[in-house]
Image: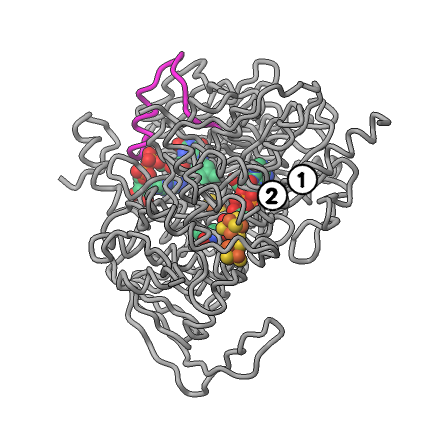
């Protein structure tokens, strides 16, 4: 049998999309999805499933797509994931499910992510309601801190078990990184993110925004004064890192978080929104992760010439392959093997350039990637007027500091039992980036769901069941 | 378009309970925000967003009433958002009101004996009187009377003098144009007071425009008075997430929203802070001048 090649996905033309915030990838239509689904071999021992962090029954849902049974496909995915339209778009599939697809060994893997996205979008567009009926309320209050993927997933599962769940969110909008970090052109907010949040709300979960746990109320007050019986902490890893090099506080130097928050959460790219955003003519984005790609592609869309300054090469970049590829297509310039040593200012204190040193790749380090080593005497300057630092983030210590007995490691990550999310304090569970440091949406979601099961067991234990 | 809020089922309204005009371009509001009122401490601030399209602006908590569940803010019109806010009336609501943010004033964690033994002066420049007030009031409730020096451009721009007199020790007034109290800058007034009294203070808390804090801190350093300043940097989230509020204090980068807003005045790099405040000047400034001009607001700094 002649093998059908992987069905290509339609995308916005790179030169057109470089100046708009519309979604880059259009996704499959029904015919394309069914054709792509027909490529799956429905393996007996599917490698893809074990490589998915939440073990979605991948051949299961793909077989339904092949038959045109999209609602059934949605129901299969819903058993393991509550955010298919999101994960189908943002999962690093090449390292996960698709990376272990048998077809990938000799050619092109099944486009699992694109198929999952298709199902998620189809469900939304056709108004299919997957909310289970007949939830029996238990009348037991559970609190969730943070409305990012981990918190939303945990809250959704607890609600399905009949708990009375309230999510407390520090920002004015729920969604976490999905709302403030990942840009519109990769993850549309109005349609995709809002629907996923709305699905959680439909289960009866309450979301109270503008509540900063540790400041507005403490976790102890949630237990003692508000009657919550257990708490899940999904507060993410939101604190930006800087390099600590001279010139970092010049005007025109931003953290990627600030730049992206202004643009995504505050919608600075839209004329009618009031929050200002600054982007000069020539921007250097320092870093090579997803966050760096997002910041760079946002700056590009706001009209700048953008350079990604990265100390290794494009091959070692931790960003998803698809994002690096898209960035490249759109005209982002990659300055590889180059590391900033200082940021240069003009007489008024604004950025005028960035001083870098050339790097060479040395021996592989613990992570298996080649360690970059400075090439002595190779310093040079790049003329830029904006620098965006995208060096990673760490968890906010606010909650661990204001909750006695809740311990974090020196990197501020909360200490938990891997399988349950149980923290060092009874009744408090945690998961997602708050535990692992910056990771992925699907891992955060998986951790939230695991914790929901453990919280249920904990409550039953209290009741002596 | 239906707002996403429509979908969220805890729908909290931050209602404006009262509003009064304290001076041209300066107004005070009580906002219904029970959770914030219950946790607020002197020295902390809130972040407010007027509506769906608004920016997040930081404002100091000037007073709070746990029973009424209200928080008092005092706002000066300086740009688009504050102008819009000045047009709201009691009964209207704010989209968002989050807090309390930042560290409470350092004195709250000091031992009573240590604090009571100190001679304290507050230096309040312009709008700075509002954030000074809760601290003086807090000391008053502890049985400690602090002196307060209030300065403004001219008599009409002095705010909250009567309220302050009720909770402070001595209240000194200074105006740049001499229309009330001491004729001159707050720094001259302090120097004059010290020279005349011959005495000194053990602690100065300076709150006002960045430039005033800079010069006041230089003077108090010369006078060997330990000094605390409250920095009003640019901010976005107010929770440590963006770094827009970075300041250099004692050679180290700090985030004003979580490490501050109060810092040791002797250690702050004011020139950098002043420069960073102007980051979006060209962007918002122009729009602002036009709007103020159109409304005939007195504080208009329009280049025309
Ligand atoms: C720009 C960017 C791009 C990314 N791209 C990808 C990608 O392509 N694919 C991928 O898989 N992953 C990506 N990630 C990573 C992914 O988004 C995160 O791993 C994931 O969102 C973590 O989920 P979470 O629920 O743990 O935390 P978050 O999404 O960070 O949510 C935490 C929530 O908790 C709230 N919160 C924090 N503190 C408090 C408090 N004290 N009280 C109340 N609420 C609080 C925060 O406001 C936030 O809403 C990206 C991240 C960024 C920043
Ligand atoms: C911790 C803290 C507490 C504050 N407390 C109060 C308060 O109690 N009452 C009050 O009226 N204001 C207070 N401010 C300042 C207030 O946040 C700004 O005046 C407000 O954000 C301006 O918004 P706008 O849209 O009206 O002006 P914009 O149009 O944003 O700004 C107008 C001009 O003022 C400059 N500017 C913007 N923000 C600030 C700022 N934070 N400080 C100084 N200059 C700024 C801009 O560069 C611009 O040129 C506080 C700020 C901080 C950080
Ligand atoms: S959730 Fe992510 S890893 Fe799992 S199947 Fe979907 S795209 Fe692949
Ligand atoms: S490994 Fe590939 S071919 Fe096999 S079931 Fe998974 S997706 Fe289908
Ligand atoms: S305001 Fe964003 S970190 Fe301080």
Residue B213 percent across, percent down from the top left: 45, 45
- List the single residue furthest toward the top: B91
Marks 2 and 1, the one that precedes in the sequence: 1
Pointer 2 chain: B
* Alpha carbon separation for disc pair 2 and 1: 7 Å
Chain letter of disc 1 in the image: B
Q: Which mark is residue A51?
A: none
**Which residue in the protein does label 2 denote?**
B203
Q: Is residue B123 above or below residue B272?
A: above
**Residue B115: x %, y % from top left:** 69, 38
On the image, the x and y values in percent for residue B56 come to: 40, 35
Number of numbered discs? 2
Asked if the stretch drawn in magenta spans residue B90, the answer is yes
Residue A423 visible here: yes
Q: Is residue A365 magenta?
A: no
Task: Report which residue position mark 1 lands on.
Answer: B118
Quadrant showing the N terminus of chain B: top left
Q: Is residue A263 above or below residue A4?
A: above
The residue segment tinted magenta is: B77-97
Percent x, y for residue A209?
51, 29
Q: Would you say the residues marked 2 and 1 are in contact, meaning their CB atoms lie under 8 Å apart? A: yes
């Amino acid at each position: 049998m002649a093998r059908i090649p992987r069905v290509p996905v339609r995308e916005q033309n790179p030169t057109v999309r470089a100046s708009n915030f519309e979604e880059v990838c259009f996704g499959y239509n029904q015919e394309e999805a069914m054709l792509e689904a027909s490529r799956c071999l429905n393996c007996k021992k599917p490698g893809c499933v074990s490589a998915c962090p939440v073990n979605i029954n991948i051949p299961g849902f793909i077989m339904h797509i092949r038959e045109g049974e999209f609602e059934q496909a949605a129901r299969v995915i819903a058993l393991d994931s509550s955010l298919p339209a999101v994960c189908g778009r943002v999962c690093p599939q090449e390292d996960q499910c698709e990376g272990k697809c048998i077809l990938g060994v000799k050619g092109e893997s099944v486009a699992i992510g694109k198929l999952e996205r298709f199902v998620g979008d189809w469900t939304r567009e056709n108004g299919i309601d997957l909310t289970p009926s007949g939830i029996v309320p238990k009348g037991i209050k559970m609190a969730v801190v943070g409305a990012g993927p981990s918190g939303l997933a945990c809250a959704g599962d607890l609600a399905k078990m009949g708990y009375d769940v309230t999510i407390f969110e520090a920002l004015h909008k729920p969604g976490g990184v999905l709302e403030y970090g990942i840009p519109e052109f990769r993850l549309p907010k109005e349609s995709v993110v809002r629907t996923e949040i709305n699905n959680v709300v439909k289960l009866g979960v309450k979301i109270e925004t503008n509540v900063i746990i540790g400041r507005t109320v403490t976790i102890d007050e949630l237990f003692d004064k508000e009657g919550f019986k257990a708490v899940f902490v999904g507060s993410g890893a939101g604190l930006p890192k800087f390099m600590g090099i001279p010139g970092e506080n010049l005007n025109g130097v931003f953290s990627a978080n600030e730049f992206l928050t202004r643009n995504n959460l505050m919608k600075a790219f839209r004329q009618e929104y009031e929050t200002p955003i600054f982007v000069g003519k020539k921007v250097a984005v320092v870093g090579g992760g997803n966050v760096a790609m997002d910041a760079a592609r946002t700056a590009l869309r706001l009209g700048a010439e953008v350079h990604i300054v990265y100390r290794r090469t494009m091959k070692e970049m931790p960003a998803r392959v698809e994002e690096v590829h898209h960035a490249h297509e759109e005209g982002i310039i990659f300055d590889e093997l180059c590391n900033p040593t200082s940021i240069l200012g003009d007489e008024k204190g604004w950025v005028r350039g960035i001083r870098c040193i050339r790097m060479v790749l040395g021996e592989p380090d613990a992570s298996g990637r080649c360690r970059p080593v400075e090439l002595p005497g190779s310093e040079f300057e790049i003329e830029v007027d904006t620098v965006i630092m995208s060096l990673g983030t760490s968890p906010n210590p606010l909650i661990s500091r204001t909750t006695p007995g809740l311990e974090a490691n020196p990197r501020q990550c909360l200490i938990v039992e891997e399988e349950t999310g149980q923290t060092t304090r009874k009744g408090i569970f945690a998961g997602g980036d708050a535990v692992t440091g910056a990771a992925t949406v699907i891992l955060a979601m998986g951790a939230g769901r695991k914790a929901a099961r453990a919280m249920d067991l904990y409550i039953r234990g209290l009741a002596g069941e | 378009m239906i707002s996403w809020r429509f979908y969220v089922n805890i729908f909290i309204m931050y209602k404006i309970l009262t509003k009064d005009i304290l001076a041209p371009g300066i107004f005070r509001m009580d906002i219904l925000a029970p959770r914030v009122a219950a946790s607020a401490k002197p020295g902390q601030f809130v972040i407010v967003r007027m509506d769906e399209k608004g920016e997040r602006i930081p404002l100091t908590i000037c007073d709070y009433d746990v029973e009424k569940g209200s928080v008092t803010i005092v706002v000066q019109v300086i740009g688009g958002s504050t102008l819009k806010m000045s047009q709201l009336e009691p009964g209207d609501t704010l989209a968002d009101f989050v807090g309390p943010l930042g560290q409470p004033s350092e004195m709250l964690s000091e031992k009573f004996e240590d604090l009571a033994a100190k001679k304290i002066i507050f230096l309040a420049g312009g709008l700075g009187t509002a954030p000074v007030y809760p601290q003086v009031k807090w000391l008053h409730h502890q049985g400690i009377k602090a002196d307060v020096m209030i300065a403004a451009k001219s008599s009409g721009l002095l705010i909250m003098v009567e309220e302050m007199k009720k909770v402070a020790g001595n209240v000194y007034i200074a105006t740049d144009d001499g229309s009330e109290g001491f004729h001159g800058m707050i720094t001259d007034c302090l120097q004059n007071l010290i020279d005349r009294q011959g005495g000194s203070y053990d602690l100065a808390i300076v709150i006002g425009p960045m430039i005033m804090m800079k010069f006041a801190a230089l003077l108090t350093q010369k006078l060997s008075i330990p000094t605390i300043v409250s920095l009003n940097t640019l901010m976005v989230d107010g929770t440590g997430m963006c770094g827009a509020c970075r300041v250099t204090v004692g050679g180290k980068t700090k985030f004003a929203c979580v490490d501050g807003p109060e810092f040791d005045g002797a250690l702050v790099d004011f020139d950098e802070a002043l420069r960073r405040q102007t980051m979006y000047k060209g962007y918002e400034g122009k729009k602002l001048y036009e709007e103020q001009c159109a409304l005939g607001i007195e504080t208009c700094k329009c280049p025309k």
